Amino acid sequence: MAAARAPASSRRCLFVLLAATLLLSACCAEGAAAPGGKGVARRRQLLRQRQVQHHLKRLNKAPVASIESPDGDIIDCVPIASQPAFDHPFLKDHTIQTRPAYHPEGLYDESKVASQKPRQQITQMWHQNGMCQENTIPIRRTKKEDVLRASSIKRYGKKMHKSTPNPSSVQPDMLNENGHQHAIAYVEGDKYYGAKATINVWQPSIQQGNEFSLSQLWILGGSFGQDLNSIEAGWQVSPDLYGDNNTRLFTYWTSDAYQATGCYNLLCSGFIQTNNQIAMGASIFPISNYGGSQYDINILVWKDPKEGNWWLQFGNDYVLGYWPSFLFSYLADSASMIEWGGEVVNTEPDGSHTSTQMGSGHFPEEGFGKSSYFKNIQVVDSTNNLKAPRGVGAYTEQSSCYDVQNGNNGDWGTYFYYGGPGKNPNCP
């Protein structure tokens, strides 16, 4: 049976109606691109500004005092109970643990030996203009420009996925897919309850604003898939995060391989700071000079055997605070791997390897005063004792760009030199 055809007059009406609709659509599109389009863009801009202001209000807690650092930072002295950690729903009724129940055994024996040797004191730049009072903590104020530099408000203060070096990977170039490169020493195959290192401090040059260079230790649990737990601490130069090229103390944590959880410093709820003298993300000085004076910092992270929280200590005197154990799955028990070393982001500007430096920017074979080092690297065992790591391995993706060399002696214990210049004739 043939389909019935609409009368000619009806078809003409439909044609006219369709033409009018198309014309109206074209006019609307033209209007959006012209004055009306500016209105849409303006509304989007205002919405983003409101989102940024909301984020800043959440991060920047009301201070009882503020200190302007010589480097341009504002350090806010915030009541300890008002810090960002307590935005976490599981921490609403949390009782702050003001000090760890136990330190690792052997820590203070080592400190006594160290105190007999003259040491250059490393401090933070903002101390030149004041200190925060008791029962407050110093927090580096986040500025609007800091948030706007991020790829999105949601990603502000977060590392990229898969930024942890995986020495057991059968594909060494796998991590280059997102541009992260490393030169590290590591141990695995046991249960670890902390790690310590003395880290040489430098100010590596950064080629691109969205690249960084850092030197840190990693406390790791889980696999290198979607469930990696990581606690990290050290120093970094990150123009994207801080807006300058200063060397800064930092921490990081994640419980899902950098996907949704965790952040740098105090840029999300999680780490509970208890110390009123050291600010996460603040500049540290002085720094080492090539062929000249050398400076280093001590970093210790350990699991309190009584409460189960992971504590952080900076130097011999500053216990900074803790990550509550409930933040983690695998690390709620122990770590399965410890890593120490350097990391850079290589965005391959202009199609070639970045010239962003790692460590001092010089290769390990140049040695003391010229190459960057980690010394006295240790792990905390199941009896809460600090001890030298056994079976230390070394790993780097491209040794012609950044390299690592392990060693051991009486004064430095287990140590390694690491780093490099990035782009060079052997690393095009």
Image (cartoon, helix red, strand yellow):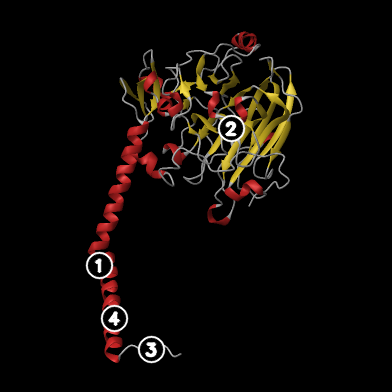
Where 218 falls versus 155 (above or below)? above
Where 423 falls versus 104 (above or below)? below
Which residue in the structure is indicated by mark 3? 4
- Res. 168 image quadrant: top right
Mark on residue 230? 2
Please name the amino acid that badge 2 sits on. Ser
Dot 4: element: helix
Q: Are marks 4 and 2 in contact (CB under 8 Å)?
A: no
Q: Please tell me which of labels 2 and 3 falls first in the chain.
A: 3
Q: Please tell me which of labels 3 and 4 falls first in the chain.
A: 3
Q: CA distance from mark 2 to mark 3?
A: 71 Å
Q: CA distance from mark 1 to mark 2?
A: 51 Å
Q: Are marks 4 and 1 in contact (CB under 8 Å)?
A: no
Seen from the viewer's position, the closer of residues 381 and 398 is 381
Q: CA distance from mark 4 to mark 1?
A: 18 Å
Mark on residue 31? 1
Dot 2: element: strand
Tell me what residue is drawn at x 33 percent, y 47 percent: 48
Q: Are marks 2 and 3 in contact (CB under 8 Å)?
A: no
Where 151 falls versus 262 (above or below)? below
Question: In the image, which is nearer the foreground, mark 4 or mark 1?
Answer: 4
Question: In the image, which is nearer the foreground, mark 1 or mark 3?
Answer: 3
Which residue in the structure is indicated by mark 4? 19
